[in-house]
Amino acid sequence: MDMKRDYYEDVQFFRSGVTLFWFIVLMAFLALFPFLFKNYYVYLANYMAINVIVAIGLNILVGYTGQISLGHSGFFAIGAYATLVLMSKVGLPFVLALPAAALATAVFGFLIGLPALRLEGPYLSIATLGFGLTITRVIGRIEFFGGRQGLHAPELTIGPWHLNTDRDFYYLLITLTVILTVAARNIIKTKVGRAFIAIRDADIAAETMGVNLMYYKTLAFAVSAFYTGLAGGLYAFVLRFIEPELFGLLMSILFLAMVVVGGLGSIFGAIAGACLLSYLDLELRNILSIPYVGLWLEALSKSYFSITGVSNIQFILYGLIMVLIMLFEPLGLYGFWIRTKIYWRTWPF
């Protein structure tokens, strides 16, 4: 029987030799990945890793604390712009500019978390949506941030190392992703994480038990914003160029879809949802080049819609996936993983 007898069993990372074995296999695969696949897939892995960081941070807020946010594209933009400005105009090195930008984003997250003390559900989501839409408009009108022309990322160096290729950047990105994933897992297992979950399940009961709602709600926003700002700073170096139009409403919807599709309240679910939707996001941008499907969509658009709307077909698919997930498996991809484990554990009976 899988019974926990003390708190150490709850927080220990490797609960069995099997877990340790597969973790070593995963780390070895990630280390060899750039040598096993072409450069495009290395770029895809970088894009996935950035979205994994965002999804884990957003899942801390939405999945574990129960606070809905549609403004994470704003935090993403703050992290990206702050990193580039600190490097190119202030002169800070990357190793200082990135965490400083993430901390600045966390401050904005704390400020946005203050309305969460009085708002919840759709009202909170509208408030965060307003923040996300406003911040990009403000950035686009300030010449110090490049205005509508955007900013180019400077050369990325860490000490004597020059990270000029996707493969070089991959190892930095994967290392940070693993560290942040472990950190999020540990946060959830501590007193802070238990307070988040208590607020999600019943905030009035949590306050009655001594949980400080003001402290933990704003902390959840700050931690989530920190993760998103850090990912935004890394994203700027994946694209090498950023502009305000990149950080729109659809980006926030994509982030939320990753968490919902993967499974709310699950680190594994956030990772799985981010990887799946990141892959679909890149692949479906060239949907017209897919054999047969592209021709059918082009003919359908010419007959009934506008051909310019085909580029947004991925968002229709995201919505369809979310609806199907809610209908058939509310736990998302994490729920399918649980079902699979149970099936093989009892197979063939």
Image: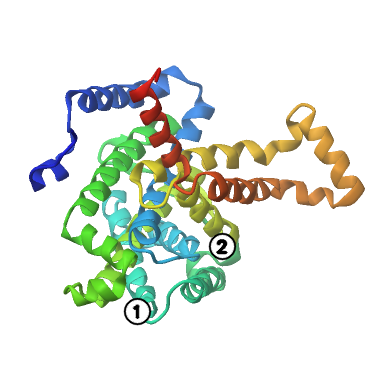
Instruction: Look at the numbered disc 2 and give the secondary structure of its residue.
Output: helix
Q: Quadrant of the C terminus?
A: top left
- For the image shown, how many numbered marks are present on the structure? 2
Q: What's the residue type where badge 1 is placed? A: Leu
Residue at the (54%, 52%) spot, across then down: 254
The x and y percentages for residue 32 are: 35, 21
Q: Quadrant of the N terminus?
A: top left
Q: Earlier in the sequence, mark 2 or mark 1?
A: 1
Q: Which residue is mark 2?
A: 244
Q: What's the residue type where badge 2 is placed? A: Pro
Packing grade of label 1 (10 A; few <14, some 14-19, many >=20) is: few
Instruction: Look at the numbered disc 1 and give the secondary structure of its residue.
Output: helix
The x and y percentages for residue 28 are: 30, 22
Q: Which residue is mark 1?
A: 117
Visible residue check, residue 175: yes
> Quadrant of the rendered structure where residue 190 is?
bottom left
Q: Residue furthest front?
A: 349
The x and y percentages for residue 235 are: 45, 48
Residue at the (25%, 69%) spot, across then down: 216
Q: Nearer the viewer, residue 263 or 247?
A: 263
> Quadrant of the rendered structure where residue 35 is?
top left
Q: Indicate which label's residue lies in the foreground, 2 or 1.
A: 1
Q: Residue furthest right?
A: 303
Q: Mark 1 and mark 2 in contact (Cβ < 8 Å)?
A: no
Dot label at residue 95: none
